[in-house]
Image (spheres, rainbow, N blue to C red):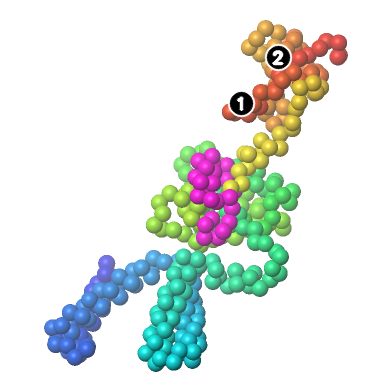
């Protein structure tokens, strides 16, 4: 309320100034109207500036200043080439208007380009490619990202946007005990990653207030940072790929690392329970793959050698079928 009153006071003050000191040799009434409109426009601009992150404002200012300098240089160059004074003046004005406009747009839309840390990395070795990956909430809570990073299979910079961190904190403060435990596990995972020497974890202030859901913000963030997304979310995976964003799905990685079993191979399994069919037993591999074994119901509770007869790929994973031969004992 106090800020609103202050804005009204400023607009009123400008209006009074326009009445007593009318600009552009206008009458007092027109001068006051012009001052009132200009004051309203500046108040609207002020509200937009207050909502914008400091990083975006910094980049927009730097981009505009660079645009002015480049526009002045280009105008000066063309002024020495063009013989017509009118054409040279037009070209100079053109560059002085267009280049700051382009600089402002680059600063607001691609603020990371003008980030001092990014500029320093730009002058480093050219053959070192930038490897940035964004973590979403599901993969942080899952926790397997820690083991993958510790083994060195993922390097570079892991980016955690501030809106992801806020979502994680909301889960950790949830009244639901299960959600609270998952959220705290996610915070512990982040703490472990920050202390790891294998990767660098950066908390990004990049946000998109006009975008509603978190998944869409992640996609916009990946576009701005030219980064990949690490996730376990199937829907986010598909939507990001449709928009040309590279996605690293840990569940797909886990499925790809499951051991390949071919018919005719001999493997050792522990018969855990009986199967649906007659004289069948069921076992499970370390990764959770179900193994259905014929002639093994009486071997429940024992570890036996079986011969693989077939492998079936289903929507939920692999199923292995085998046969227990008493002669192999």
**Which residue is at 37% across, 90% downward?**
86
Q: Nearer the viewer, residue 88 or 204?
A: 88
Vertical side of 235 occupied by 19: above or below: below
Q: Are marks 2 and 1 in contact (CB under 8 Å)?
A: no
**Which residue is at 15% across, 83% downward?**
30
Q: CA distance from mark 2 to mark 1?
A: 20 Å
Q: Nearer the viewer, residue 189 or 158?
A: 158
Residue 206, given in percent of the width and then of the height, sits at 50, 61
Residue 198 image label: none
**Which residue is at 39% across, 65% downward?**
51
Residue at mark 2: 281
Residue 237, magenta (yes or no): yes
Q: Nearer the viewer, residue 172 or 54?
A: 54
Residue 277, given in percent of the width and then of the height, sits at 65, 9
Q: Is residue 80 visible?
A: yes
Vertical side of 141 occupied by 266: above or below: above
Residue at mark 1: 314
Question: Is 301 situated left or right of 19 in this image?
Answer: right
Looking at the image, tell me whether mark 2 or mark 1 is earlier in sequence order. Answer: 2
Q: Is residue 172 visible?
A: no
- Asked which secondary structure carries label 2, the reply is strand
* Mark 2: few/some/many CA within 10 Å (<14, 14-19, 20+): many
Question: Is 74 situated left or right of 251 in this image?
Answer: left
Q: Which part of the image, by quadrant, shows the C terminus? A: top right
Residue 191, magenta (yes or no): no
Give, as a single range, the part of the protein colored magenta: 222-246
């Amino acid at each position: 309320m106090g800020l609103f009153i202050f804005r009204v006071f400023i607009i009123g003050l400008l209006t009074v100034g326009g009445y007593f000191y009318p600009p552009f040799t206008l009458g007092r009434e027109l001068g006051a109207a012009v001052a009132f409109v200009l004051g309203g426009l500046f108040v609207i601009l002020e509200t937009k500036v207050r909502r914008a992150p400091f990083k975006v404002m910094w980049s927009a200012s730097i981009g505009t200043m660079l645009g002015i300098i480049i526009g002045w240089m280009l105008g000066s160059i063309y002024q020495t080439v063009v013989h017509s004074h009118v054409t040279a003046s037009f070209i100079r004005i053109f560059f002085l208007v267009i280049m700051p406009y382009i600089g402002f747009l680059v600063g607001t839309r691609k603020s990371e380009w003008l980030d001092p840390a990014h500029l320093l990395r730009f002058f480093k070795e050219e053959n070192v490619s930038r490897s940035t990956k964004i973590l979403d909430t599901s993969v942080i809570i899952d926790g397997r990202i820690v083991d993958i990073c510790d083994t060195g299979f993922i390097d570079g910079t892991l980016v955690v946007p501030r809106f992801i961190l806020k979502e994680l904190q909301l889960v950790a403060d949830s009244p639901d005990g299960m959600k609270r435990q998952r959220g705290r596990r996610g915070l512990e995972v982040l703490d472990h990653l920050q202390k790891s020497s294998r990767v660098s974890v950066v908390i990004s202030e990049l946000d998109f207030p006009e975008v509603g859901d978190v998944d869409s913000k992640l996609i916009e963030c990946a576009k701005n940072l030219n980064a990949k997304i690490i996730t376990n979310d199937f829907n986010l995976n598909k939507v990001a790929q449709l928009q040309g964003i590279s996605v690293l799905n840990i569940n797909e990685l886990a499925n790809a690392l499951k051991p390949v079993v071919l018919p005719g191979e001999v493997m050792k399994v522990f018969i855990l329970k009986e199967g649906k069919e007659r004289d069948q037993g069921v076992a499970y591999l370390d990764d959770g793959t179900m193994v259905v074994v014929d002639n093994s119901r009486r071997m429940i509770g024992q570890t036996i050698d079986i011969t693989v007869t077939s492998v079936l790929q289903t929507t939920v994973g692999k199923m292995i079928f085998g046969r227990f031969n008493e002669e192999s004992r």
